[in-house]
Structure formats: C-alpha cells, structure tokens
Image (cartoon, rainbow, N blue to C red):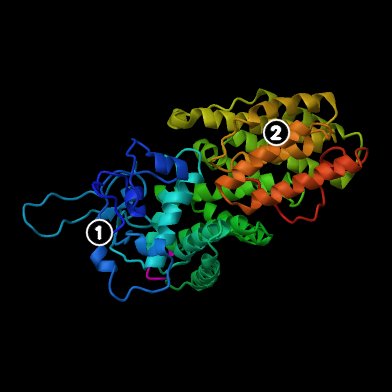
Amino acid sequence: MGNRVKGEVRTRSGCRKCRERRVKCPEQRPICGHCKRLGFVCRYEVKLSWQHVVMCDDSPRGLPDDLLVSIHSWMFLNMDQADFSPDSLRAKRRPSMCTEDPVYQFDELAPYPRYLPPFRLGEAESYLWSYFDEFMAPSIVIDPGFNPYRNIVLRMAAHSQEGPLFQCVLAAAANQLQSIGRNEYKSVMWLHRAKALRLLRTQIFRMASGEASYEISHEFSKDQVIASTIMLTFYEISKDCSDAWTVHADFARSFLTSRLRDLKNLSAEQEALLSFAVTYFVSHDILAATGGTLTEAAERVTETCKLVDESTILALTGCSRDLLILISEINQMSSEIGQSHQKPLPATIQRRRDDIERSLHQLNQEIPDEFRSCQSEFSTVAEVKRLSAILYLYARIDGAGPHEPHMIRVTSQILSLVATIPIRTHTGLWPMFIVATLGIRPECDEDRKLLLSRLAALQQTRQLANVKKARKIIEDVWKSRDLRPEESQGWNILHGRRHGAISLA
C-alpha cells in the first residue's frame, strides 16, 4: 500500500472484476473500459465473500499471485439456481414470523435441487471455477441468455463435487489457461482430466451394476454421465482436437439413444440437458463428416434432430434444424454414391440431389423473438451456413471445382458475409472452412488473406485446437491446388487427408 499516489481516493463503486484485480475502475455502465478491452464479464452487483472462512493461515504456498489475490471463496450461502441462470425461477421460501431458518420448497421431480447447499472450494479450484464461469462460458454461445454451460453444466457440477462433471469443468478451465501461456496449469489440467475419467468409469460401472453413486439418484447419475461426456469432448477438441474426442462422441451416441427412450418420463430440466447433448453431438457428427476425415454415423440423424426443439439447435449452432438435416442428407447421399461408383447419377439419387438443392435455395431460417437481442448475429451466421451448404452440395455431389461459374457466384456471396461473421463464438468456423477449401480459387490472394485474418481473429478470441487444425488443412488444400490445379477439383481434395477427425461445430 506504500506505493499509492498521495491524495488518491479508493472507492468501492467499481465493478467486481476491477476490484478483484485491484485496479481503478473507469466505472462505465453497463461495461467498464477495462472489462470491455480484456473480455471480462463486468458486474456491479454486490457479491458476498466470506473471506475469513477461506483465507486462513495455512493457505497453500507457491501459488500464482492472481490465485492469492482472488477473493472468490465460492462458499455459497443461501444461493439457488438463479446464481447460474438469471432468468430461472428462484426456490420458493415460506414466510415466517419467527427467527428460525427459512424453509425451502423443492421440486421433487427435479433431477437436482434448485437450492444448492453450502460448499467450499480451495484457492486453486476456486480460480479455475471462476475462470470457466466468468470468461469461458459466456464466449461459447451467441446469445448470453441461452447458455446451457452455465445454466445446466455448472449447476450440476456444483451440486456434486465428488462426481466426474466437476473435474471436467476444472480440466477445461486449466486447459484454456495453459493454452494462453500459463504453463503452470499444464500438470493441473492432466490431473483433473485423469480424475474425471476415473470417476466417469466408476460411475458408469456402478450404474451398470445397479449400485447407488455418490449418494445421488440413478437418474441424476445418467445426467452426470451425459454432461461429463459433453465436457470431455469439449476438452479434447479444445486441447489438440485429436481423435480422442470421437471416442467420447461414439459413447455419447449410444448412451443418448437409450436415454431418448425415456424422453416422455423426464423432467423439464432433464429434457433440457438431453436436448443440449443431442444438439451438441449430432452437430459435431454432421459437420465433421463434411471435412473428409470422419464418416458420419447417419443412423436416425433426421429422427433424432426432430426430437430437439428448433430454438435449442439455433442457439447452439447458429442455424436451423432443417439446415442441419439437409447437410446430413448430403453426407448420406455422398456415401451411397461412393459405394455404387455410378456416373451419371442414378435417377433416384439425382432426384434426391435436386430436391436438396431446391430446399436449400428456398430455406427460410426465421429467428424467434426470444433471440432478438442477438438477431443480427443469428441472421448472419444462419445465412452464411445456408450458402456454405449449397457450395458443399455442388462440390461433394457434383464434383464442381472452384472455377465453375455457379461456384464462383456462391463463393462471392459467402465472402461478402465472412467479414461480418461474429468471432466471439466458434459458430463461424464451418462456413469459413467450407469456402476456403472448396470455393476460393488459387489466384484469389485477397480472398485467402481475408479468410486467414478471420481465422486468426477467431483463434485469438478463444484458443481452440480445432481452429488451428482447420487452418492447417486449409493451407494444405491451397498448396495442392497451387501445385496440381488440374487434379484438385471438387470435394475429393479433402477426402482422406491425414489430419485426423476435425471438429467444425
């Protein structure tokens, strides 16, 4: 405190993040200048922090300074789900005329209670939890009002710290920190990942044998498995986008198939988790298959998509349910063509191809009123994905190359929107990948520069390994087109590349 400027007045009216970082807050509302520049969540409300409970004399030594500065004790007292979802209903409290503790009413059908009992985290865990909650979760979705990572995943993880989901969240946060140069979190990342996998295997074994797990219901154990698999897939894609994420996705596909049979008996919260999981894994399956490194598991994709409400798919993918189904049909039709090797196309397949093209041109992706706060972003992403699906159809089914007139026209339309694609989330990765590999001609250096700059901006916003892998594949495709333009036509230029499975969702 000795280096404080004389006459400087310390105030307590700054935002929580500036006070936490011990810097003077410019106090602009609703977002101060510091938080806007650094990408923090800016909040001015009061947050109770029982610092004397956590900051004791036996605090662990050798931790980074910012861990010791953090005052997020995460000792939740009298908190409910509204702390994770501002729009959710709070637990009802009966009025009382005496001084005894309030009695809360719980929903017996809910898979986990709305009221979270007090729990305590260590300093390192508190920092990782806070980092995921305040920095990572808001940047994953387009509309902050619809965020299943906060409204569902964090609530479930907070309720069962002994379960695998809690460790998955900490592993994801540690991975993000080490990817931006915080190398001290590398060992922490591996530690939490190992714990998550061990606990998940144990929970699955106990479910199969009919044993109770962590003193929670059998139904909640199923939800823990689903949410943990989502977060493990998220972790593997973010870390290095190796084929490990497809192992989790394969397991999730079979587990969700059995879970969908119980759909009519699920509570609203369980159904929301299931919709989130189905959308997450189905979209990853469909879009990964367009990259040429993974074969889509096409069984029941259309039927499964139709079980999820359109708003959930739009919120998580930035496009309509109908568009996802059309892209899946292109994947399936291409597999059938590849097996038959018939040219020209059989009449039945040609009719299917023409129907898909007609549907893509006529597709109207309306944005519901519930997303009007981000309507321009949704509209841009949905339209650029529709155009990319048309380009993908021409390249994969027709074998059209980037120099053909109709390919040039669609590519030009996509590129006119690329500069406006929001890079706050990763929803724009797939259309950028498709237009870069299938639409941009070798002589169009300015178009290549535009795509590379947008990918670099996306990578800088969120250090995701799948963005790095996508850029590597794009650059390899461009080299192939430059060196052998006569052999590098259509979608086949992507087929069989040895980069492993890539996530484009």
Give the SS element for disc 1: loop
Please give the name of the residue rendered at 67% of the width and 37% of the height, measured from the top-left corner: 431
Q: Which residues are magenta?
A: 214-218
Of callouts 1 and 2, the N-terminal one: 1
The answer, for residue 409, to whether it is visible in the render is: yes
Q: Position of residue 335 (x, y in %)?
A: 80, 45
Q: Amino acid at mark 1?
A: Leu
Determine the image quadrant of residue 485: top right
Image quadrant containing the N terminus: bottom left
Which mark is on residue 77? Answer: 1
Q: CA distance from mark 1 to mark 2?
A: 49 Å
Which mark is on residue 500? Answer: none
Determine the image quadrant of residue 380: top right
Q: Position of residue 65 (x, y in %)?
A: 41, 64
Whether tag 1 and tag 2 are in contact, CB under 8 A, the answer is no
Of residue 396 and residue 188, the one placed in the foreground of this image is: 188
Of residue 292 and residue 122, the one placed in the foreground of this image is: 122
Of residue 180 and residue 209, the one placed in the foreground of this image is: 180
Q: Residue furthest bottom?
A: 58
Image quadrant containing the C terminus: top right
Q: Amino acid at mark 2?
A: Ser
Q: Residues within 10 Å of mark 2 (few under 14, many from 20)?
A: many
Q: Is residue 329 magenta?
A: no
Determine the image quadrant of residue 78: bottom left
Position above or below: 106 against 442: below
Q: Position of residue 134 (x, y in %)?
A: 42, 50
Please give the name of the residue rendered at 38% of the width and 62% of the height, measured from the top-left corner: 126
Q: Mark 2 sits on what residue?
A: 388
Position above or below: 436 against 62: above
Give the SS element for disc 2: helix
The answer, for residue 337, to whether it is visible in the render is: no
